[in-house]
Image: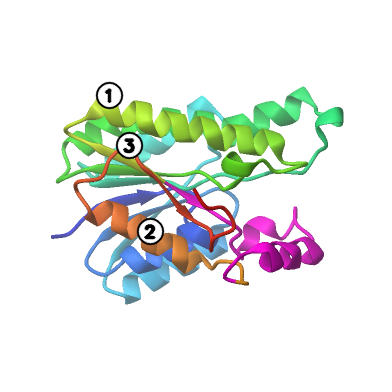
Amino acid sequence: MTKTILITGGSTGIGAETARQLAPGNIILVHYNASKIAAETVAGEVNRQGGQAHLFQADLTTEAACVALVNQVAQNVDHLDVLINNAGGLIQRQPITELQWELMERIFALNVFSVMKLSSLCLPLLRQGTKPCIVNLTSIAMRHGAPSATIYGAAKSAIDAFTRGLAKEVAPDIRVNAVAPGVIETPFHEKVTTPEQMQAFKNNTPLQRNGQAGHIALAIKMLIENDFMTGETIDVNGGLLMR
């Protein structure tokens, strides 16, 4: 059965790979912010793999943009089966002793407020879907702390809590789960993590390697397909953190 799937931050990294893996037979709504060329590339790949891609641009750090995005989606489709809240970012590393209020607002707007608002706005479309579900992206940073990325970790912890709360609030009609990636080799790290840090992460991981976007996309796919899971956060980190 064809699924209509909205993926935020779908132009690169985990979002792009998820779009590719979910493409066959499905309608993939790819949201992007600044990466138009990359988004167009993903759309082409989705179409070639037997899916149907639609592109939507929005800066999700404002309420107005979140509202505008959902309005655009609703003009193109009459329902959603899956919402994948993937858009997010560390933005920049900053020691807690030098923390700036403006940076805190930016981090929470991108990683928390947009997820909460989009989830709320998409509920009517999801309720028109078949076995609808939401998948949020959190991070290993919420589990073990991340020096110089403490606020990012706190933001992802908020999404972890939001996932459980929303799962209870919208049950039994809609399922809500999350994936907490470990260190994944995507453009996410290019501006905020040095090669030396990436190597250190690899050395400290029991599997002796960092993850790839496909590892997270597989977990997202599993959460979509398993209709007896809700309120759960799945850790995919190569053993860097075990519970």
Q: Name the residue under label 1.
A: 169
Is residue 230 magenta-colored?
Answer: no
Whole-percent x and y of residue 33? Answer: 56, 48
| Picture residue at 32% right of the left edge, 59% below the top | 221
* Residue furthest right in the image: 98
Q: Name the residue under label 2.
A: 219
Three-letter amino acid code at disc 1? Glu
* Residue furthest bottom in the image: 48
Q: Name the residue under label 3.
A: 231
Mark 1 vs 3: CB contact within 8 A = no
Label 2: element kind = helix
Whole-percent x and y of residue 214? Answer: 45, 68
> Is residue 99 rendered to the left or right of residue 120?
right
N-terminal-most mark, 2 or 3: 2
Q: Is residue 53 visible?
A: yes
| Picture residue at 55% right of the left edge, 37% below the top | 156
| Picture residue at 75% right of the left edge, 64% below the top | 200
Three-letter amino acid code at disc 3? Gly
